[in-house]
Image (tube, helix red, strand yellow):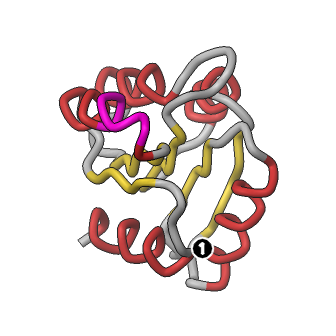
């Protein structure tokens, strides 16, 4: 069975790029456009990894990480954000993100991060 990945980002082009590259890499990928939609999706489905942007409208990535820690602690999280948001990435790690990746990133960097958290 393919590992299941939920990609959460409010930028459609980033979600699309991540979905396409992770699907090509052999993952079963779903998408959410913000933290609120991600949490609704997580309540209905299980995932091996969540790739979550930190700064988003509605609920942000930190809220998604806190939800995972509380409700699905075995689900790994890769947090993504711009380098100017380094304090948020550090907060993401403190809250339970397994990996953090700064934007801009390549598809290969995200694929490597997802593979690393699964191993």
How many dots with numbers? 1
Q: Please say whether residue 2 is one of the residues in the magenta stretch.
A: no
Q: Please say whether residue 86 is one of the residues in the magenta stretch.
A: yes
Q: Is residue 103 left or right of residue 56?
A: left
Q: Which residue is mark 1?
A: 22
- Residue 48 sits above or below residue 19 on the image: above
Going 42% across and 54% down the picture, which residue do you hit? 102
For disc 1, the neighbor class at 10 Å (few under 14, some 14 to 19, many from 20) is many
Instruction: Classify residue 79 by image quadrant.
Output: top left
Residue farthest to the front? 84
- Residue 69 sits above or below residue 4 on the image: above
Query: Magenta segment, which residues?
Result: 84-89
Q: Which x, y percent locates residue 34?
A: 68, 30
Q: Which x, y percent locates residue 64?
A: 47, 27
Q: Is residue 75 left or right of residue 43?
A: left
Q: Which x, y percent locates residue 51?
A: 50, 50
- Magenta region, mostly helix, strand or loop? helix
Q: Is residue 68 left or right of residue 1?
A: left
Q: Which x, y percent locates residue 18?
A: 65, 65
Going 30% across and 29% down the picture, which residue do you hit? 87
Camera-side residue of 32 and 105: 105
Quadrant of the image containing the C terminus: bottom left
């Amino acid at each position: 069975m393919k590992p299941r990945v939920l990609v959460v980002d409010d930028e459609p082009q980033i979600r699309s790029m991540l979905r396409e590259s992770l699907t090509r890499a052999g993952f079963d990928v779903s998408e959410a456009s913000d933290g609120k939609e991600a949490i609704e999706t997580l309540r209905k489905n299980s995932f091996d990894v969540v790739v979550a942007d930190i700064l988003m409208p509605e609920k942000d990535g930190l809220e998604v990480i806190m939800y995972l820690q509380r409700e699905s602690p075995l689900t790994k999280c890769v947090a993504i954000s711009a380098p100017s948001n380094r304090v948020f990435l550090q907060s993401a790690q403190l809250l339970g993100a397994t990996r953090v990746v700064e934007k801009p990133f390549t598809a290969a960097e995200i694929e490597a991060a997802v593979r690393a958290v699964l191993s």
